[in-house]
Image (cartoon, coloured by chain):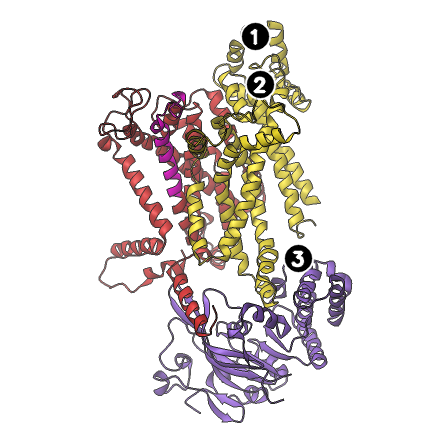
Amino acid sequence: MNNSITSDANAPVPHHESEFRQKCRAAWMKTKAFFHGNPPAIIGGFLMTVILLGALFAPVLSTHNPDKRVARPHEAPSADHILGSTRNGRDVFSQVLQGARKTLSVALFAGIIATVIAVSVGVTSGYFGGKIDEWMNFATNVFLVFPQLPLLIVLAAFLGQVSSIVIAVLLGVTSWPWGARVIRSQTLAIRSKEFIISAEVMGESKVRIILVEILPNLISIVFGGFLGTVIYAMGAEAALGFLGLGDATEVSWGSMLYWAQVSSSLYTGAWWEMLVPAIALALTGGALALINMSIDQVSNPKLKTGPHLKLWKKLNKEANKRRGLV
Amino acid sequence: MNKPLLEINNLCVDYVSPNGIARAVNNVSLSIKPGETLGIAGESGCGKSTLAFAIARLHRAPGLIPEGEILYNGKDVLKMSDKELRDFRWNDASVVFQSAMNSLNPVITIGEQLTDVILAHKKITVKAATEKAVELLAIVGLPGDRLKSFPHQLSGGMRQRVVIAIALALEPKLIIMDEPTTALDVVVEREILNELYDLKEKFGFSILFISHDLSLMGEIADRIGVMYAGNLIEIGDAKTVFTNPSHPYTKGLISSFPTIHGPKERLYGIPGDPVNLLHLPEGCNFNPRCGDCMDICKKDEPQLIELSVDYKAACYKL
Amino acid sequence: MSFLLRRLSFYFTAFLIAISFNFLLPRMMPGDPVEAMFAAAQGKMDPAQMDAVREMYGFMDGSLFEQYISYIQSVFTLDLGPSVLMFPIDVTTVVGMSLPWTMFLALGSLIVALIIGVSIGTYASYRREGFFGQFVPPFLAFLSNFPYIVTALLLFYFFGLQLELLPLAYTYDPAIDPGFTLEFIGSVLKHAILPMGSMILVGIATWVFNMRNAMINVLGEDYVTMAEAKGLSSYRVMYRYAGRNAILPVATAIAMAIGFSFAGSIMTEVVFNYQGLGNILLKGIMARDYPLIQAILLILVSAVLTANFIADLLYVWLDPRISK
């Protein structure tokens, strides 16, 4: 990883510490350096932590059973139902917590599938080059020019109301090309670096070179691509759910939107049924984007903005002032 | 003609990095007389290019100039307003960058890159500017129809000629050259340097010539300055610096180049690595690599002392 | 020139793949979608008409390969048979009526987002250390990554329902006769503000970041420093020397964004009941109108491929080094 950002990790460490503790310490320093002087990362990280905790502890935090009729239709938010109730008398607060689990796991699962494919295709294509690269690049480009979401809509339509697992798999296998493209070009760049050439000359196996020499240098790009896919997959899941192409009996943020639409909740003044899942989706997407933006700065140090630029600004202003410049 | 064209006093340039402030140019003072060629030598990272850029105030964030003045004909470049600065740039001092490939914009025609500087500074018609551009290309030995070309359609030598033509466009009094021929092969380098000297005869500009190639500099410069870790450590007439240097670093630098004309001698490098600007040694910056290091060298930084008229070096041995 | 030819042949191949996919789709599905479709169309079509559709659709007797050839023929002759949903109108006619609206939304919002985003990105790189450069890009990143559907719903609710500022449905006021009149164009624009606005909001961050990052990379190049050293105005340095080059990587990203924009249009149209392909697509899905669904998919693919080719032309025009 980049030196200018992680340099704190190189600070002298007392000898008696075990290797494990040293590693933990280095990881902690890296994390600290990532958030230091970086409000977007702090805000994004905070929001995401709250959302993930909410999803994780949904069964504990829920005030009602999300699948049962527990209120009169379209009850406004009150002490008993913090975020009101749906047309079908479900508790919106409990549903949005439950829905977080479904929606986030679909998005994460799709993200993992897409990332695995993207890394395999991108690294293989970039490292081996030649005919393999040509064909893989062709496949990537074909996938890239197809409008993904309409394709998904049609697929889902042909399959009938599809379960969330199918949606996750479909999203995963259709959304890898963006990542693959970036990873390929980065692999090409790393490939021609001296340490790879020297490893090749020394006769290291190709598998080892890919796993040990190339992959660690791709981490920030791969993770950035992963987050991008998760954001996209979440939006697509919500879209399919909203259109009624998902399984409307499962509680997810997408299916919540669907039921809110079916019950015309916005027109009848029961805004909470629609807006609560919508805002949950919005905050998650926004938070992930903020984190992704900060990861970008790690993989491209030129983008790094931080406390040192503030210092520069101050010193430069002072120097200009001394010279009588405004 | 004793008044210097350019006078730099106590110039410091800092870079603010996430790990601290690095001083790339430290307290450098020097002057260039009209029509003179001053060479600045040193290994990469010694601050010579930073110095060159600072003269045209081209440093950007995170670089800044906390102290010093750069007097051009008595006027401080660092105190100029934006408008004065734009007028000063290229009218008075033009710059030839290290690599012509990188200093010409790849998607703009040679013609536009030549005429826009003329049009920005002179109130003339586009037609007149184009005529002037053809004239300039002719001066550096290129046909006028090259105006329509893009940089990638020219060879490396041709591109460097274009860059020189652009530098001459407003007939400035000073041309700053930052390793202008490093990217070229030796034959083309020779050709271009010869042409440059003919042009200098003709137009009478001064040159600040930045290079790591001391032997090249020995041939073309009137005076040579040597920089190490941001400090100017030796400056004087080219012949003395080249044949009888005073500072141990200059000695090391010269003995690491082969001479073409002299007898075959053993080449000596300089042991050790260039210093990290964020962690400078106490005392003389060169002390960790110096063969003649004394106790005082590890305590106090040596100042430039005048060894003879117009000849200075900074070392406690002297 | 050979660059464009290469791209053209690539798009043609991609189109063939799309057709093949379309051909295989109903044949790979569990059950018999054709039967389901005809079941849905019961009472609308008589058996003779059904047979005609069946044949046009490639479901005739014969090997899979013969069916395939016949299908390709019907695609290239634009003879895709009648729609089940709007029988007896031809699928091509139905698609032809709504395609312009989707193109208008998808490409219109893409172009507006591109122009605004590139300007903001350029300025953000110029004012990197300032408030603008530090605050605006993260803010837009946050806002732009709301899912399409969410942004559309939020705008629909706040500007349409709550503030009652803008119309909530249709492409233009049904009371106005379509024509080249000021009233009609005004109505079309008014109806486009919300759907297009939500798509612009979603699309904009891509361009801000692409442009800003490209600018930051380009600003370190010698030719920009040289332009500055030449004493050119900072406007000229920023736009002509730096911006002109930074736009190149941005132009390559357009190809990718076109697909996204069409997808976004499909979603947005449903929320705003805008009479484009997305709306028809959803209705087609509800009615199991497979010929219509497939025709829409094909037309979307063709539109995206064509738009990609235009983006390639733009790239050739922008970068003189490519056209060798």
Quick check: can you spot residue A56? yes
C-alpha distance separating marks 2 and 3: 50 Å
- Quadrant in the picture for the C terminus of chain B: bottom left
SS category of the residue bearing label 3:
loop
- Asked if the residue under mark 3 is in contact with the one under mark 2, i.e. CB atoms within 8 Å, the reply is no
Distance from disc 1 to disc 2, alpha carbons, whole Å, reads 15 Å
A139 or A75, which lies in front?
A: A75
How many other residues sit within 10 Å of disc 1, few (<14), some (14-19) or many (≥20)?
Answer: some
Decide whether the magenta segment is chiefly helix, strand or loop. Answer: helix
> Residue tagged by mark 3?
B108
Give the chain letter at badge 2: C
- Label 1 sits on what residue type? Lys
- Please tell me the colour of chain B: purple
> Looking at the picture, how far across and down is residue A45, in whole percent?
33, 46
**Along the line of sight, the residue nearer the viewer: A259 or A100:** A259
Label 3 sits on what residue type? Ile
Chain shown yellow: that is: C
Question: Viewer-nearest of labels 1 and 2?
Answer: 1
Which residue is under mark 1?
Answer: C44
Q: Is residue C17 visible?
A: no
A268 inside magenta stretch: yes
Q: Is residue A310 magenta?
A: no
Answer above or below: position of C18 versus C136: above
State the residue lying farthest toward the bottom.
B308
In magenta, the rendered stretch is: A262-288
Q: Residues within 10 Å of mark 2 (few under 14, many from 20)?
A: many
Residue, disc 2? C291
Query: Of the residues tagged 2 and 3, which is closer to the observer?
Result: 3
Secondary structure under badge 1? loop
- Judge left or right: residue B217 versus residue A65: right
The chain coloured red is A
Earlier in the chain: of badge 1 and badge 2, it is 1
